[in-house]
Amino acid sequence: MKAKVFRGDSLADPRYDVYDVPLPSDGTCTVMDVLEYIYDNLDGTLSFYTHSVCNQGICGRCGVKTNGKVALACMRTVTEEEITIEPKNDKIVKDLVTL
Ligand code: FES
């Protein structure tokens, strides 16, 4: 699948980078899995909330917009062949990390 991901911040030329991510056929892949795949295998400069948070839908720190709708990255499953992942609000620190 293709993941189009917001990069940058409010001040410096925001852009979208597109990554090819293999999608497992069992329907268990989450947006967090996509982001972790990108970070681990394609682009270690991507900033998002991950290892310091719960990964169980409890803390609420991993909220992002996926195809325009706010969702928890650790709970939102991915079945589409193409998704757009953006910060959940306008107070962007870097990439998908927001205040
Ligand atoms: S990591 Fe805690 S809700 Fe997603």
Image (cartoon, rainbow, N blue to C red):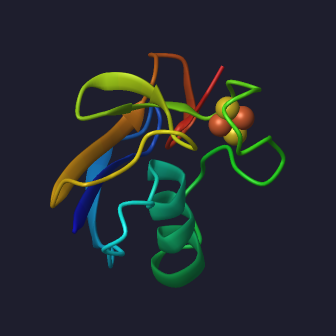
Q: For the point 68% across and 24% down, which residue is it?
A: 60
Q: Total of numbered circles in the picture? A: 0
Left/right placement of residue 82 relative to residue 68 reads left
Please tell me which residue lies in front, 63 or 89: 63
| x and y percentages locating residue 68 in the rendered image | 25, 26
| Extreme-bottom residue of the structure | 41
| x and y percentages locating residue 47 in the rendered image | 60, 52
Q: For the point 45% across and 27% down, which residue is it?
A: 71
Task: Classify the position of ligand 1 by quadrant: top left, top right, bottom left or bottom right.
Answer: top right
Please tell me which residue lies in front, 19 or 92: 19
| Extreme-right residue of the structure | 52
Q: For the point 66% across and 19% down, which residue is it?
A: 99
Quadrant in the picture for residue 36: bottom right
| Extreme-left residue of the structure | 81
In the image, residue 30 sits, relative to residue 86, either above or below, namely: below
Please tell me which residue lies in front, 74 or 11: 74
In the image, residue 31 sits, relative to residue 33, either above or below, namely: above
Left/right placement of residue 3 relative to residue 65 reads left
Residue 59 seen from this side: yes
| x and y percentages locating residue 50 in the rendered image | 70, 50
Residue 10 seen from this side: no
| Image quadrant containing the N terminus | bottom left
Left/right placement of residue 9 relative to residue 45 reads left
Left/right placement of residue 25 relative to residue 33 reads left
Quadrant in the picture for residue 76: top left
Q: For the point 23% across and 34% down, which residue is it?
A: 67
In the image, residue 64 sits, relative to residue 33, either above or below, namely: above
| x and y percentages locating residue 89 in the rendered image | 46, 17
